[in-house]
Amino acid sequence: MSAGGGAIGLLAGGMLTEWLDWRWVLFVNVPIGVLIAVLAPMYINESERHSGRFDIAGAVTSTAGMASLVYGFIRAAEEGWRDTLTIGSFGAAAVLLLAFVLIESRAREPITPLRMFADRNRSGTYVIMLCLAAAMFGMFFYIVLFVQNVLGYSPIQAGLAFLPVTVVIALGAGVSQRFLPVLGPKPFMLVGSALAAVGLAWQALISSDSSYVGGVLGPMLIFGFGMGLNFVTLTLTAVSGVAQHEAGAASGLLNATQQVGGSIGLAILTTVFGTASREEGEKQVQDFLANGSPAQKAEFATTHQLPAPWGHEVLAQGISAAFVPAAAMAVLALATAWLVIRVRKSDLEALSGSAGPGLG
């Protein structure tokens, strides 16, 4: 369903952007949300209610801490690592996240039960999802920039360019769903993370002369299949062996690590992209001033934007540099799967028992 939604979203987003306005990409969620809110009570049974208290302090400190951390990376990309606000953001993030851990360790009903991290398989699963999501969010963002600004694709064409990725993600999820009860989660985590690392390392070789097939499609297919192998595997491993009343917390933490990983990963990649782009931009400006035509120089004096091919070279170099830490994140996921994940026979039985008809 995620792969199908991704395919529809890419196409719909391209059509809305090209035919109407990019703001419609955000506004279209309003009627969709209203429709779901109306239909949900008709088709989804209400679960049993339990008494409890909201962990307001944990929610505030975790949200503010992650926001400060992400902003610190974004600020560093714009103003540098010695900027006062950059340093202050990282300092605030450290204080807030430390406060969050202390609050959760003492809260009667914490929003993030720290005991969830006691199991090494579950903790490893969260780390793997964090790393892969960090790489994935950044990959999609920068490849969209490349296909539109370097290859010259329209928004609709860019959406179509990503369709094959959703297909291989679905294929990978189907393979893991079929063989997970037999082989267990670790092989899929290892192979999936390794494929993701290979795809991202390939994308780190991207240049202004790269074609769609050789520079974009090939590595994306490898990466997508690896992610497909991991999605089902990580979800089931995160909730296996968890008490029924804590299954929501375990799966919620997995979703949280995916979103947090995406935010932090994109911020880190943006920092690397900004640094590499500035350095390459200085070189390309000098070359442009020496070899550009008078008409191009006159336009540059007005817009302050390098024309092609100089501008394309700057963008491609920045994207290439950004994929280096993305590949490193996938390697970290691979190392975690190799060193941390330990699957026993009881784990396999738990997975088979919780898999349902589709995985039995």
Image (cartoon, rainbow, N blue to C red):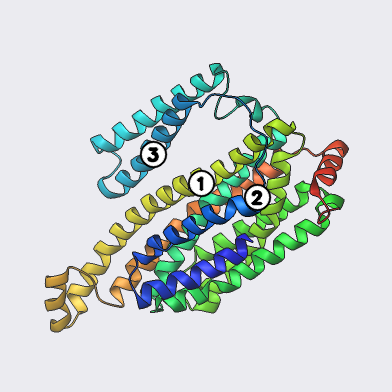
> Residue 337: in sight, yes or no?
yes
The residue singled out by tag 3 in the image is 67
Q: At 63% from the left edge and 28% from the top edge, which residue is drawn?
A: 50
> Where residue 1 sits: x, y (%)?
64, 61
Question: Which residue is more in the foreground, 289 or 110?
Answer: 110
Residues under labels 3 and 2: Cα distance? 33 Å
* Labelled pair 3, 2 in contact (Cβ < 8 Å): no
Identify the amino acid type marked 3: Ala
Comes first in the chain, label 2 or label 1: 2
Q: Is residue 19 left or right of residue 33?
A: left
Dot 3 alpha-carbon crowd within 10 angstroms: few under 14, some 14 to 19, many 20 or more: some
* Labelled pair 2, 1 in contact (Cβ < 8 Å): no
> Where residue 153 sits: x, y (%)?
41, 79
Q: Which mark is residue 139?
A: none
Q: Is residue 125 left or right of residue 80?
A: right
Q: Quadrant of residue 146?
A: bottom left
Residues under labels 1 and 3: Cα distance? 12 Å
The residue singled out by tag 1 in the image is 259
